[in-house]
Amino acid sequence: MKTISSFSCRFLITLLAFGLTGSAFAEIKLAPVIDASLSVSSAAYDPDYVTEETQSVNPDDRSTAENIYLYFAPNVRFTEIPGLWITPAVEFEYNGANNILQIDDEAFIFARGYNLYYLLGANYRFNQTWQAKLKGFGRLERSAETSDETLENGIYNYSDAGAWGEVNARYKLGVPMRSKLGYKAYMRRYPNYSVNWRQEFIDEGGDTLTAQALPDDLDEKDINVTEVWLRQEMTWGTFPLLTNIEFHVKNVFYTEMPKYEPDGTFSNELREDIYADIILEIPYMINKFHQIEFDYSYRLHYTATGYYDTSQSAFLDGYYNYRENKPRLLYNFKFWFPITGFAPRGSVSFGWRNRYYYSRPSYQQTGSGENTVTEYKWDDPHWESSLDFGITLRQQLFAEWFNLFLSFHAISQTSNSTVEDNATYNYKYNTVTLGTAVSF
């Protein structure tokens, strides 16, 4: 594998060197990065909710299949331009077992899928203080949710195309610091997703009306996205503690999706969403074998559009708006066992997420049998709370670049919406993965 990769790298480097310097004999430096793994994963998804008919919990949905991961980045540096790096990269991941994907504000279970990410750009260091990055990228996300879907016709398949740039500066202001300012813009398209928007609702007089009709092939989910971020990193001298804080704003512009009006018809204006994040990271190096890190993020999401529920003849203003708290604790370690000669590396993580939809009522079911009532609880806004636990162990085998790994990951999410239609807010998801990995 190293021989083939080396030949491919030399061929690519020769082309780049010829294009930038006019000479195929330009002196270059290569820093290839290869990370690959092959594993088997067993996943169980349990949508935990009460059905109106049986008052029972749905059975587990289990699957076992292979996972493949590959990352290849043949980074190239030219000796004639010492501050310049050319940075191509390709990342591919295939998951054949059950996998949870977050679509808008709901979670869906997918039977299999793959993600292909490719990037080409450049890093340039002007001096010891200033550095700039400019990169173009693309992404293909392919997933199959149901048995009659393939990886190419999945309804939630999408493609990204865009670019991002970042300027960062290293300096000392009491303690060593680094500041980063970045901007990203990209288009996301769902080639297989369309919705029939012809809906009916009941007005106050009891007459059935048809909402404003839009084309059946409306590209509801197609979006254009812009992001901007400012990140500050601080190293507290000889004390092995870092403090990183980031402010991140994302605007999501829907290219065709209109906003709802309170009467259930559609506005001439298109939907636009804003996400504002504050991220705090505090890693602490106990020693060279043990590290602990605390992360916290706070998000505000706002959109001017509402949601019209035709089954309840109700317009829910602010339906998608929420605020979210997300703390996480991470512990990285390495232990030495003298008798066996093993020195496994690993990590343990524990996270909690709470999302509160302050303008959306919860949807609850009370009573039983003929006395069953399903209704919005306007005095009890919808919330979701999830716990996320993960542990990974890696043991080096035969060589420094080859290891065996075992991981376990569990998510448990609950909410105060308790009817069948809200199953995507209440679930348990566990995965166990065993595999081998190489890293150069």
Image (spheres, grey):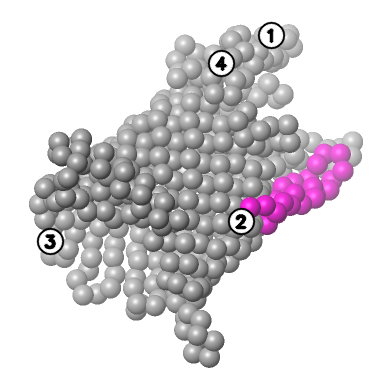
Name the secondary structure under disc 4: loop
Quadrant (top left/top right/bottom left/bottom right) for the N terminus: bottom left
On the rendered structure, is 173 left or right of 342? left
Q: Residue at x 48, y 40 (%)?
A: 116
- Whether label 3 touches label 4, CB < 8 Å: no
Q: Which residue occupies the extreme right position in the image?
A: 370
**Amino acid under disc 1:** Leu
Precedes in sequence: disc 3 or disc 4: 3
Q: Which residues are magenta?
A: 42-66
Amino acid type shown at disc 2: Ile
Amino acid at the residue labelled 4: Leu
**First in residue order: circle 2 vs circle 3:** 3
Indicate whether 68 appears above or below 133.
Answer: below
Element at label 1: strand
Q: Circle 3 sits on which residue? A: 172
Q: Residue 179 at what x, y percent from top left?
A: 21, 51
Q: Position of residue 142 (x, y in %)?
A: 56, 36
Q: CA distance from mark 3 to mark 4?
A: 53 Å
Q: Position of residue 385 (x, y in %)?
A: 58, 52
In the picture, the disc for residue 411 is 2
Query: Would residue 407 be seen by someone viewing this image from the given angle?
Result: no
